[in-house]
Image (cartoon, rainbow, N blue to C red):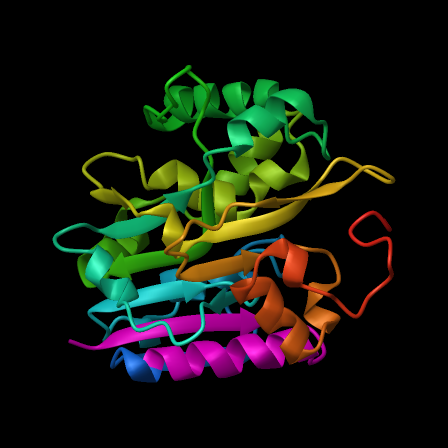
């Protein structure tokens, strides 16, 4: 089996980028996978008029990825837990792709307003998917559209070919969303593109355990913000979604990934994470 972990970065080098690359490359070696990091190499951007945000999808348009049995797309702000040896690719058996949900996001989108990313727009978006592509988008236990996070995705060889041959192009999707009017830019980007079409036709999807993409982000605004830490006891890949974290030193990122919040002792403004 040839398995590949793929990361990309557009922009100048930063300490967090260097550390994610170092750790993910070492993790790939431990599980017998290959590793590829594209730095300031634009591929998908040449196929759609939204720059940067479709670069995680380079394997969906570049033939050089077709030789692999499985390809994992991993964001540059994702870090393996210390010494992780569990195999990311073992999540797939006969599925076309695997991805984790953000189980708390439907609730947050009901109570917060962030750049138009709200429950009402999720409903409009899922209805558009049904009307245009006959996609029955999944909902949670109380009928809220699920939220999937493309920070960690595993795609099989046959799944990748389905994406290339059966899915609309990036630009076709973007054009439909634009013509619908009123959708914030967020809904035009790769995460929602991918989230839409993994539910198309006969595509076989695996909802992976959330330990494979457990995320951290800030709640509320200054001065009462707190950290939403979704790490379970068996956290495997940790998605550090704090603004500016790519500028933090490696030892600070290690503490964030591996220690309880109370022990982080970060070398940043004393008011963090309330300093936005």
- Residue 20 location (% of width, % of height): 54, 75
Question: Does the magenta run of residues contain 25?
Answer: yes
Question: Where does the N terminus fall, quadrant-wise?
Answer: bottom left
- Residue 201 location (% of width, % of height): 23, 34
Q: Residue at x 18, y 50 (%)?
A: 95
**Do we see residue 10 in this rendering?**
no
Q: Nearer the viewer, residue 118 or 46?
A: 118
185 is higher (above) or lower (below) than 109 = below
Q: Nearer the viewer, residue 135 or 100?
A: 100
Describe residue 206's horizontal placement relative to residue 109 as left or right: left
- Residue 128 location (% of width, % of height): 47, 22
**Res 61 → quadrant:** bottom left
Span colored in magenta = 1-28
Q: Residue at x 42, y 26 (%)?
A: 129
Question: Does the magenta run of residues contain 148?
Answer: no
Q: Nearer the viewer, residue 51 or 12?
A: 12
Q: Residue at x 26, y 68 (%)?
A: 87
Describe residue 26's horizontal placement relative to residue 88 as left or right: right
Q: Residue at x 31, y 58 (%)?
A: 154
């Amino acid at each position: 089996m040839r398995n590949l972990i793929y990361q990309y970065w557009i922009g100048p080098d930063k300490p967090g980028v260097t550390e994610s690359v170092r750790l993910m490359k070492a993790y790939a070696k431990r599980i017998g996978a290959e590793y590829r990091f594209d730095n300031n190499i634009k591929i998908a951007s040449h196929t759609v008029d939204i720059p940067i945000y479709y670069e995680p999808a380079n394997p969906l348009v570049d033939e050089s990825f077709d030789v692999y049995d499985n390809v994992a797309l991993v964001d540059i702000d994702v870090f393996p837990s210390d010494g992780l040896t569990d195999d990311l690719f073992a999540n797939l058996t006969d599925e076309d792709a695997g991805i984790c949900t953000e189980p708390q996001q439907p609730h947050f989108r009901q109570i917060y307003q962030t750049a138009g990313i709200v429950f009402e727009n999720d409903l409009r978006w899922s209805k558009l998917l049904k009307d245009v592509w006959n996609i029955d988008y999944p909902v949670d236990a109380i009928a809220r559209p699920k939220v999937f996070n493309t920070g960690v995705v595993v795609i099989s060889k046959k799944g990748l070919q389905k994406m290339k041959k059966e899915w609309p192009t990036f630009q076709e999707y973007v054009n439909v969303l634009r013509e619908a009017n009123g959708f914030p830019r967020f809904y035009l980007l790769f995460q929602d593109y991918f989230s839409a079409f993994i539910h198309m036709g006969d595509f076989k999807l695996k909802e992976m355990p959330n330990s494979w993409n457990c995320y951290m982000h800030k709640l509320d605004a200054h001065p009462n913000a707190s950290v939403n830490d979704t790490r379970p006891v068996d956290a495997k890949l940790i998605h550090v979604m704090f603004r500016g974290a790519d500028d933090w030193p490696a030892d600070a990122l290690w503490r964030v990934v591996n220690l309880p919040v109370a022990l982080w002792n970060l070398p940043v403004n004393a008011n963090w994470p309330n300093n936005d």
